[in-house]
Image: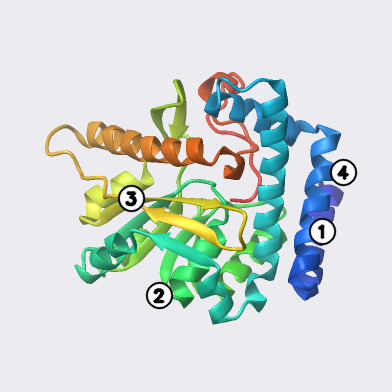
Amino acid sequence: MSGARDRMTDTLYGLGWSTVKKLPEPAAAALGRTVADTAWRRRGTSVLRLESNLARVVPDAGPERLAALSRAGMRSYMRYWMESFRLPTWSAERVRDGVEVKELDLLKDGLASGRGVVLALPHLANWDLAGVWVTRALGVPFTTVAERLKPETLFDRFVAYREGLGMEVLPHTGGSAFGTLARRLREGGLVCLVADRDLSSSGVEVGFFGERARMPGGPALLAQHTGALLLPVTLWYDDSPVMRCRVHPPVDVPGTGSRAEKTSVMAQAVADVFATGIAEHPEDWHMLQRLWLADLEPGRTRPGGSPQ
C-alpha cells in the first residue's frame, strides 16, 4: 500500500507540473481556489492542523474567524502551488513584476560586502517565487536545502524543478549540506533557507507565540562559522497579483557566550521576526504540520512533513 500511495503522490505532482503550467493564468488561479475550497470544506487533518496553529497566532479569534482564516490560508497555500507549477513558464518580466521587495538594500549591501549572506524565511506566501526573483531579477545564484521526500522520484522532481529555476539544491540528509553551504558563504555567495520548522533532531528551542517550538539552528550556525550576514525575510500576498517581501535588519552574532548560547539567542531573534510577519499576515502562513512542542507525539523530535 505504501508503494502504491507513493506512486500516486508522484503521479499527482507530475500532473500538476505538466498540466497546470499550460493553463491561462486566470484559469489556474480559479482552479487553485476551487481545490482550496474543496479541501477546506472537507475539514481534513491538514485543515484542522492549520486552524490549530492559527489559534496560537490569533489567540482572540473565535470559531468563525478561525474558519475564515483557515479558508483564506488554504487559498493562499493553493496559490503557492499554482504559481510554483507555472514558474518555469514565467518570463523574466513576469517574475520581476510579480514581486516587490522592501529594504532590498540590506541584501544588496550584504552581497557587495563579500561576507556572504544567509536569508532565513518562514513558510509564508511563495518562497520559490522569491528565489526565482533573486536569480532572475537580481541575477544572483544561491544555494538552498530541500527536505528528502518519499518517494525518491518526487524528491528528484523537486530538485530538478528548483535547479531549472537557477537554484543549487542540496538534500537535507544523506550528504554534507552544511559544509557546502559554508563554502558558498565563504566565497561571498548567497544561501536561502526556509527556517521555521525543524527537520532534524538538533533544532533549537525558541519561544513562539507564547509557547515553545523547535526551529533550525543552521542559519545561526552558518553565520557564526563563516562571518556571513544573517537576514530574516518575511513574505505576504495582498489582493493584487504581486507578492510582497521584506528584508529585515541583520541578526548579529552575540559577542559573548558559548556556541550553543549564541545559536539560541540568534534563533530566537529570527523566530521573533517570523512571528511579527506571521501575525501581520496569518492567512499566508502555510504551516499545515505540527510545530509546537506541546503538539508533538511523545518521543518525536520533529513534525511529520509535506514538501518544503
Amino acid type shown at disc 4: Met
Between residues 234 and 142, which one lies in front from this camera angle? 234
The answer to which quarter of the image holds residue 22 is bottom right
- For label 3, the residue is 248
Amino acid type shown at disc 2: Leu
- Spot the residue most to the left: 255
Residue 198 shows in this picture: no
Sequence order check, earlier mark of 1 and 3: 1
Give the structural element (helix, strand or loop) at label 2.
loop
Position of 139 relative to 14 (above/below): below
Between residues 73 and 6, which one lies in front from this camera angle? 73
User: On the rendered structure, is 185 left or right of 274?
Assistant: left
- For label 2, the residue is 138
Report how far apart the C-alphas of labels 1 and 3 lie in the structure: 34 Å
Report how far apart the C-alphas of labels 4 and 3 lie in the structure: 46 Å
- For label 4, the residue is 1
The numbered disc on residue 167 is none
Sequence order check, earlier mark of 2 and 3: 2
Amino acid type shown at disc 1: Leu
The answer to which quarter of the image holds residue 20 is bottom right
- Give the x, y percent position of residue 287: 60, 39
Between tags 4 and 1, which lies in front?
A: 1
- For label 1, the residue is 31
Amino acid type shown at disc 3: His
Sequence order check, earlier mark of 2 and 4: 4
Report how far apart the C-alphas of labels 2 and 4 lie in the structure: 45 Å
Asked whether disc 2 touches disc 3, contact meaning CB atoms under 8 Å apart, the reply is: no
| Residue at figure coordinates x 49%, y 35% from the top left | 279
| Residue at figure coordinates x 86%, y 50% from the top left | 4
Sequence order check, earlier mark of 4 and 3: 4
The answer to which quarter of the image holds residue 186 is bottom left
